[in-house]
Image (cartoon, grey):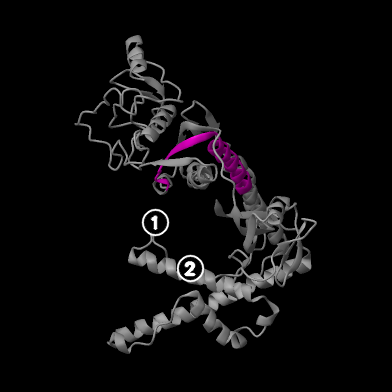
Amino acid sequence: MKTLQAYRFALDLSPRQERAVLAHAGAARVAHNWALARVKAVMSQRAAERTYGVPDELLSPPISWSLPSLRKAWNAAKDEVAPWWAECSKEAFNTGLDALARALKNWSDSRKGARKGRAVGFPRFKSRRRSTPTVRFTTGVMRIEADRRHVVLPRLGALRLHESARKLARRLEAGTARIMSATVRREGGRWFVSFTCEVERAVRAPARPGSMVGVDLGVKHLAVLSTGERVANPRHLVVAARRMRRLARAVSRCVTPDRRVRRVGSNRWARAQQELSRAHARVVGLRRDGLHQFTTRLTREHGTVVVEDLNVAGMLRNRRLARHVADASFAEVRRQLTYKSEWNGGRLVTAGRWYPSSKTCSGCGAVKTKLTLAERTYTCTACGLSLDRDLNAALNLAALAREVTDDRSGRESLNGRGADQKTRSRGQVAVKRLPGTARAGQAGTVPPQGGTTAQRSLLSTRR
């Protein structure tokens, strides 16, 4: 199975090499800002002509936003705009132009309704102080040296790595990987290089191919599995908040840069800002490492993983929970589960956004119309089942994996619960699931506890 995979390594640059990389990142920024100014000038000219009543066929000719067109225009004007262009690789200017072409296309598609998600704004000029220095190489010599501690990039030469690149080097030597591009980027005061490779991955199978596990993501616990396991939420941002506040106060007390009076920041400000950036980068690294370990273990063990399509944007509007929801990174968990399930030979089932996993009884299938966030124990009024709210939701998600698959044909079908609408109103009666349906059988999950003896025996009979 061929797939695109990135390998990321930390760099250990000398001062001369760092200046060279910064020069390439600055060249990308110059090309981006020049092309954006050219596009805005043409759009402003056409808008002004329309205000004078000029018909559309007589307006100033528009310019193309594609990367080849922008690159052709840059090559024609680079001698005048950047006489020093020969000092940097052509890939540096291509990085800025490619970023602008993608941004303009996303903005155009968003206006036309061809792009999902939030509305994308018009591209803005990149600032030397605020933008992240980055440069991407797609052509030229890109290789890992024999000592596996140096990488070679066009015009930059050999760059020392802070760690060994043996994992990628072994694949390159075996012929199971091919480098497509290399991106150098600064994050948290450190430089990293990411190799995008076309990798030939071996076909794998989960340790338990027939296992179906439901994953209920939350804030109190990062995840509650239908197997009864609870994955603790480390809350890296909350732990580091006190130190980050102290560092932020130290930054504010220094002589900060001010463009209005042409004042540059002091050396103490630069050092304090670097310490604050490292604190943020540490939180990001710890969070990323924990999520990778969790999702890798989940996809390698279970054949089917069921998650919810959460409205994270709506959750972030809650000012009391926004920080904790953002720290949990629900979208990142789902993103990693998506491609790791494919890598490990499993599958990922996503429950609909309106699927009432928390309101549905995992025993009899009755649905509550209201369930406040403060109710941490789910109590069914129909069968008397009482168990933890998150575990109940995880059990419902695990059972959903059977509903979306036809047992006879093995083909995936539509959501059997009709999870494309809100929970029915209070005046309507909750419909119970008939015995023998998919929700009644929950192989590989923890049986719900609670209820009377007769109710538990009835549940076991249905199973």
Q: Is residue 294 above or below residue 18?
A: above
For the residues labelled 1 and 2, the Cα–Cα distance comes to 16 Å
Pointer 2 residue? 102
Nearer the N terminus, badge 1 or badge 2?
2
**Disc 2 packing (10 Å; few <14; some 14–19; many ≥20):** some
Q: Is residue 322 magenta?
A: no
Task: Return the mark for residue 454.
Answer: none
Residue 182 x %, y %: 64, 63
Label 2: state its secondary structure.
helix
The disc placed on residue 117 is 1
- Judged from the image, the secondary structure of the residue bearing numbered disc 1 is loop
Q: Which part of the image, by quadrant, shows the C terminus?
A: top left
Which region is colored magenta?
A: 283-312
Comparing labels 1 and 2, the label whose residue is closer to the camera: 2
Question: Which residue type does callout 1 highlight?
Answer: Gly
Furthest residue in direction front, as rendered? 409
* Farthest residue, direction top: 453
Q: Is residue 296 magenta?
A: yes
Which quadrant holds residue 33? bottom right
| Closer to us: 2 or 144 | 2
Q: Where is residue 80 in the image (x, y as percent from the top left)?
A: 60, 88
